[in-house]
Amino acid sequence: MIVDEVFHQRGHGIYELTRVHHSDGYVLRVRVCRDSYATQSTAVAEVLTPLFTWTIIASSPGSGWHRTTPATPPDATPLITVADEVLQRARRILPVPPPFTTPGR
């Protein structure tokens, strides 16, 4: 379940999508940052820890998806597929239920 989604354009060829999900007892944040250069573009999925810090658990370098994204998109659509892929990878990595919760609470 997506709780929050923010799309931001910072200049020609530079834009980012941030999504926060509640999934299987976790809070997950997915950030896809598209830069003018593929080597400076990245997508990461992070999990919120019990200490309220974000820990990267999955990533995708821009070299794998940068060329499929336009320099000036009208909205977040070009980044949604990338965000969904890194989120699915993160969900496969995480145990269900989270190890830091007590069943029934």
Image (cartoon, rainbow, N blue to C red):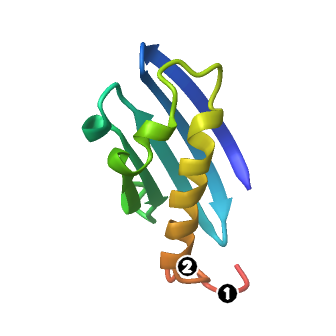
Q: Quadrant of the N terminus?
A: bottom right
Q: Which residue is pictured at 52% across the width and 51% down the height?
A: 29
**Mark 2: which secondary structure?**
loop
Q: Position of residue 69 (x, y in %)?
A: 51, 34
As rendered, which of 69 and 35 lies closer to the eye? 69
As rendered, which of 46 and 87 lies closer to the eye? 87
Q: Is residue 14 above or below residue 86?
A: above
Name the N-terminal-most of marks 1 and 2: 2
**Mark 1 belongs to which amino acid?**
Pro
**Mark 1: which secondary structure?**
loop
As rendered, which of 26 and 59 lies closer to the eye? 59
- Mark-to-mark CA distance, 1 and 2: 9 Å
The label nearer to you, 1 versus 2, is: 2
- 47 vs 42, left or right, is right
Q: Which residue is pictured at 54% across the width and 77% down the height?
A: 92
Q: Is residue 37 above or below residue 29?
A: above
Residue 54, can we see it? no
Residue at the left extreme?
39
Residue position for label 1: 103
Q: Which residue is pictured at 61% across the width and 49% down the height?
A: 81
Residue 94, can we see it? yes
Q: Is residue 11 above or below residue 36?
A: above
